[in-house]
Image (cartoon, rainbow, N blue to C red):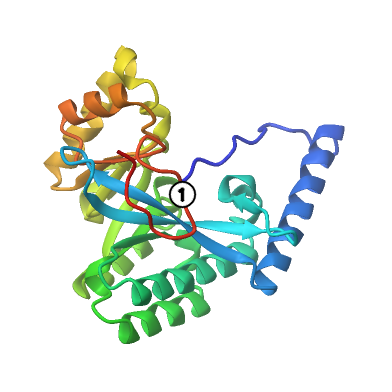
Amino acid sequence: MEQAAIEPVGLEADTPLSVAVAERDRDTLAFVADAAREGRVRLAFQPVVQARKPTHVAFYEGLARVLDRNGRTIPAKDFIDAVEGEETGRVLDCIALERGFEALAHFPDLRLSINVSARSIGYRRWIDTLDRGLATVPNVPGRLILEITEASAMLVPELVQVFMADLQARGVSFAMDDFGAGHTSFRYLKNFYFDILKLDGQFIRGIHEDPDNQVLVSALVSIGQHFDMFTVAESVETARDAAYLTSLGVDCLQGYRFGMPKLAPQPPAA
């Protein structure tokens, strides 16, 4: 999942800045709601490659994109914070899942991850979309990965655990997104049984020359290996970072080094 922009915190009520932020968020929310209603939501596909065979795609991540009325693409980082806690965020998750199932039906060899907020797990339209897709798209359970951010999973950890156990029994895989960016309780991590840990990009960029991040990522990879989870490094942008991450034992790599998100699945960059 793409890293959202960092928002101002600690704003006092009714200051000029807080009013401006609230107004911006209202405008963003209305823009995304209009786009969802008018069918202007797409998925962009970014390859996740095998670290030791970077020409081989392990799976693609489907990233929500909103189009403005002129057809210009707006990435999720520009709107996700404003919609995450609103029903518009739930609707956006539904549309992303619908588009994901369409891609899985169209490309029979595609393995695809789709982002979902823990808030959407109890949303009836999202559950109906999931059940319908699992029932109608050929061989989809083994090809679908659901990504839940670390922060989102911690909102309702018990609900997420039950939901994951049910879906994993049906063949769906799960990835914890942005791992390391939040405050996961390790007693929960022990019980979650995620299949994949995606290491947050703030620790990845420039890692080949950052001793602190080298220690942190090495520890995160060890955690993943201990719990038999595949590890994916996000935001890999250079060959030197890719080589260093591979030497640490990271299983897969994702980032502009291997391909930008495209509106159709593309092979990784050489």
Q: Looking at the image, is 91 positioned above or below residue 82? A: below
Quarter assignment of residue 70: bottom right
Residue 150 visible (yes or no)? yes
- Say left or right for 21 vs 47: right
* Residue drawn at 15 percent across, 33 percent down: 249
Q: Looking at the image, is 45 positioned above or below residue 142? A: above
Residue 122 visible (yes or no)? no
Quarter assignment of residue 52: top left
* Residue drawn at 25 percent across, 68 percent down: 109
> Which residue is at the front of the view, 118 or 10?
118
Q: Which residue ends up furthest to the front in the rendered image?
A: 270
Q: Looking at the image, is 87 positioned above or below residue 28? A: below
Q: Percent from the top left, x then y, of residue 159? A: 37, 64
Q: Quadrant of the C terminus?
A: top left
Q: Percent from the top left, x then y, of residue 46? A: 40, 50
Q: Percent from the top left, x then y, of residue 265? A: 39, 58
- Helix, strand or loop at mark 1: loop
Q: Percent from the top left, x then y, of residue 230? A: 19, 46
Count every numbered label the image shows and give the total: 1
What residue does disc 1 label?
A: 261
> Which residue is at the front of the view, 108 or 111?
108
* Amino acid on which disc 1 is placed: Pro
* Residue drawn at 22 percent across, 69 percent down: 142
